[in-house]
Amino acid sequence: MSTLVTVRQTTTTNTNMNTNNGNNNIDSQTTVRSYGITQPISMKGPDPCDRLATENLEETLRSYDYFESDAELAHRVEVMAKLNTLVRKWIRDVSLAKNVPPEIVDTVGGRVHTFGSYRLGVHSK
């Protein structure tokens, strides 16, 4: 019997960030939390040019009906719940077929985990 284990490594880094618009005499210490093995490329926020580019991109994506509607999101959540129910039932049926004791069958479980762009909600329709 094999077991799948997910490991999340959390790193905390202290950085000195100048928060006084060019006055190097006043620095504050900020704790940056990153998940995984790499640090953020930059902690600098978007400048006005970046914000404008983001607005233009979002407008273009909206014009192509790229974003998921609330109804589509609700349907996706419903389908994932049904799929998880089917997986749990299947695991229970297989466990019983393999003569796993009934008191243990009720404790075994499984579920479907989404990941990547789908998990983050940044997938296309």
Image: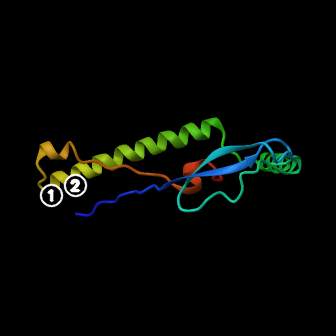
Which quarter of the picture shows residue 68? Answer: top right
Q: Amino acid at mark 1?
A: Lys
Q: Position of residue 80 (x, y in %)?
A: 46, 45
Q: Secondary structure at mark 2?
A: helix
Within 10 angstroms of label 1, few (less than 14), some, or many (20 or more) residues?
A: few
Q: Answer yes or no: do the residues labelled 1 and 2 have beta carbons within 8 Å?
A: yes
**Residue under the point 28% across and 47% down:** 109
**Residue under the point 22% across and 50% down:** 93
Q: Position of residue 117 (x, y in %)?
A: 59, 55
**Residue under the point 48% across and 52% down:** 114
Q: Position of residue 124 (x, y in %)?
A: 66, 53
**Residue under the point 48% across and 39% down:** 78
Q: Amino acid at mark 2?
A: Val
Residue 31's label in the rendered image is none
Within 10 angstroms of label 2, few (less than 14), some, or many (20 or more) residues?
A: few
Look at the image and tell me whether residue 13 can be seen. yes
Badge 2 is on which residue?
Answer: 94
Model colouring: rainbow
Badge 1 is on which residue?
Answer: 98
Which quarter of the picture shows residue 39? Answer: bottom right
